Amino acid sequence: HCSRRGICRVNSSMQISLDYGKQGLMVTLPDYLDVRTLAYKTATPLAQQPNMTDRQALQAVLDKPNNTPPLNEIIQGRSSVCIVICDITRPVPNQLMLEPILETLHAGGIETQNIKILIATGLHRPSRPEEIVEMVGAEIAEKYNVINHDAQDPHQLVYLGKSPRGVSMWINTHYMEADMKITVGLIEPHFMAGFSGGRKLVCPGIAGIETIRAWHSPRFLEHPNAATGQLDGNPVHSENTWIASRAGCNFIVNVVIDAYRRPLKFVAGDQISAFEEGAAFCQDIVIDRVDQEYDIVITSSAGYPLDTTFYQSVKGMMAAVPIVKQGGSIIVAASMTEGIGSDEFASLFKRHPNIDDFMQAIMSPDYFVMDQWQLEMMAKVLRKAEVKVVTDGLSQETIKQLFVDSAESVETAVDEALRVHGQNASIAVIPRGPYVIPEVVS
């Protein structure tokens, strides 16, 4: 018997499916354990609603957007368009969303050669040709000018001055020069900015390294409100909202998806209003409440494409923090098929003997190593719990050099944690990792 939360009872054991790579990972635990699994609320995908298809639902918000005229009206008189999309690390149904947008642009007189599709890489690596096809479909990839943003190429950046908080604002030139600016993205929980989507396509998506460095500095990240699902009082959110508003955006199209990556809701229109509409819907879907903290929390990094590096797996670790006891154990499973992450991120573990030494170093305003912010977020995890990592992508010896422990399997990691916390230890499982927001309520 399998519950809707993904626990299957088989004889004297239970089986739990974790999002892992492209195939998932089945974990078998003794049936006597008291396990609480956290999941999305049940929500009906748009395509399963009466008289509705994904395309019809999307067209409806393009025709009646939030706080802007319809897209077909906004494009009147425009001659060039830049459409910003997420890179391969976000499971956005780009092709589904781009097709009606492009059709509307062409119907409004915009020619193919005057449309650029800009990939919001932030400081991630460039998208490979085969990944671009995976992201947007073969026809769009072949027909349109698809460009990778490069945050370190000064020729791709234009300076917009300083924000009120003193952050130098550098934004992609292709975007700033376009007559019409559109962003297409996914609204999901984000461990720094509260939620992804909306303004995040612009900053950090198509911002310069100097801007991203300042936005990702301890000044912002160490704030207690820089957390998953938190928008109010979150300086990370308020700062990139200001920067994105300064850069300008004529129209956004965002989606909220379910655990099977099926669209649950589309929002479109004003960069702030439509994002807030989508974030409110997403928050209601992804929060799962429990009445206690747990000794052991088993989690994932949400599978492909988010779990391809150790860098990205930090988001899975962060997902467990709200519900793990102080001194508890977090077990995270991630495929890490592309290794640790960038060379700069990997170098941090060689520069510093431990996490405390790293945290002391980054408090100096002169210290900067690209991707240091991810290790800073991991420090928040390690302040509360020990971390055990299960992966096929990196050796156990390598994992142990990354300030965490390694385990051959989730089952082995659970056995080790039970020896520490006792056989009656409380256990929670978050199969989708950072896509679910756990919350303790008394």
Image (cartoon, grey):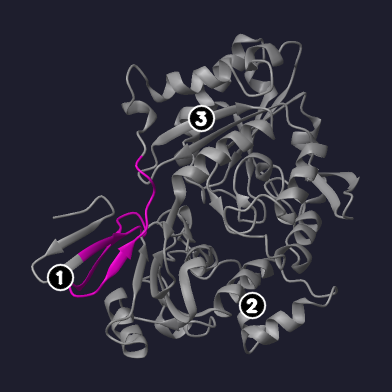
Residue under circle 3?
266
Q: Which SS class for mark 2?
A: helix
Which residue does the numbered mark 2 point to in the structure image? Answer: 347
Crowding at label 1, few (<14), some or many (≥20) Cα neighbours within 10 Å? few
Task: Give, as a single range, the part of the protein colored magenta.
Answer: 15-42
Q: Do the residues labelled 2 and 1 touch (CB within 8 Å)?
A: no
Q: Which residue is drawn at 49% across and 38% down?
A: 256
- Residue type at numbered disc 3: Phe
Q: What residue type is labelled 2?
A: Ser
User: Compared to 277, does 49 lie above or below?
Assistant: above
Taking the magenta stretch, the answer to whether it contains residue 352 is: no
Q: Where is residue 336 in the image (x, y as percent from the top left)?
A: 44, 66
* First along the sequence among labels 2 and 3: 3
Label number found at residue 376: none
Element carrying mark 3: strand
Amino acid identity at mark 1: Ser
Identity of the residue drawn at 68% across and 23% down: 67
Residue 362 drawn at (x, y percent): 76, 76
